[in-house]
Image (cartoon, rainbow, N blue to C red):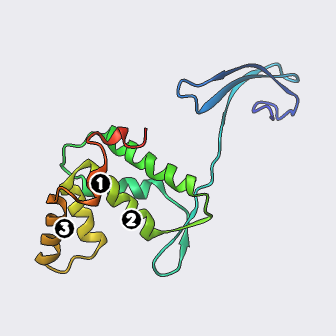
Amino acid sequence: MKCPFCNAEDTHVIDSRDSEDGHKIRRRRRCHVCDKRFTTYETVELRLPQVVKHDGTRTEFDRNKLLTGFKRALHKRPVPTSYVDAAIDRIVQKLLAMGEREVTSRSIGESVMEELYKLDKVAYIRFASVYKSFQGVDDFRDVIKEVQKPSSPHNSSEKNPESANE
């Protein structure tokens, strides 16, 4: 690791510690040339798959786009931010677990719908209306009936969305 002060390549690790969340390693280093100390952080870099859109174009996965979609659907709904973050984390983990280099935007949209269904039925219907391009009241009525069914395929998850994948 180069020294940020003198650009020397001769640095030494003095101390290493795991971060509180366990996802980073904090390293204190000392430069042998200028004798200054500095801190570096080591994290795992996982590559998320590229997103293949419906028109065939490819783009990098963007977690912020997911967050924006959740925020729009959950606007003025009583869902804690921690639940939204956990839902997005589950989607990202699902994508990483697939191990694919590419994933369709449709499969991401379906995952968002599954998570919104667990979080808030109104948000689910809002998202579905845009995602599925509702054309009239009948489309809304069909989704509302689906949400009200006790045997709906989405109802198999626990009440607390944070415990869904634990």
Rounded to the nearest whole Å, what is the CA distance between mark 2 and mark 3? 16 Å
Q: Residue at x 34, y 38 (%)?
A: 82
Kindly identify which residue carries mark 1. Answer: 116
Q: Considering the numbered disc 3 on the image, is that residue within a helix, a strand or a loop?
A: helix
The foreground one among 118 and 67 is: 118
Note whether 145 is above or below 35 in the view shown. below
Q: Mark 3, residues whose alpha carbon is within 10 Å: few (<14), some, or many (≥20)?
A: some
Q: Is residue 162 visible?
A: yes
| Residue 65 coordinates in the image, percent (x, y) | 42, 58
Q: Residue at x 63, y 49 (%)?
A: 46
Q: Is residue 96 left or right of residue 73?
A: right
Q: Residue at x 22, y 76 (%)?
A: 134
| Residue 101 coordinates in the image, percent (x, y) | 62, 64
Q: Considering the numbered disc 2 on the image, is that residue within a helix, a strand or a loop?
A: helix
Report the amino acid beneath label 1: Leu
Note whether 66 is above or below 132 in the view shown. above
Q: Is residue 71 visible?
A: no
Q: Dividing the image into 4 quarters, which one contains the C terminus? A: top left
Kindly identify which residue carries mark 3. Answer: 143
Of callouts 1 and 3, the N-terminal one: 1
- The reply to whether callout 2 and callout 3 are in contact (CB within 8 Å) is no
Note whether 86 is above or below 110 in the view shown. above
Report the amino acid beneath label 3: Val
Kindly identify which residue carries mark 2. Answer: 109
Q: Which mark is residue 79?
A: none
Q: Considering the numbered disc 1 on the image, is that residue within a helix, a strand or a loop?
A: helix
Q: Is residue 98 left or right of residue 165?
A: right
| Residue 48 coordinates in the image, percent (x, y) | 58, 56
Rounded to the nearest whole Å, what is the CA distance between mark 1 and mark 3? 13 Å
Report the amino acid beneath label 2: Gly
Q: Is residue 61 left or right of residue 111?
A: right
Please identify the quarter of the rendering in which residue 116 is found: bottom left
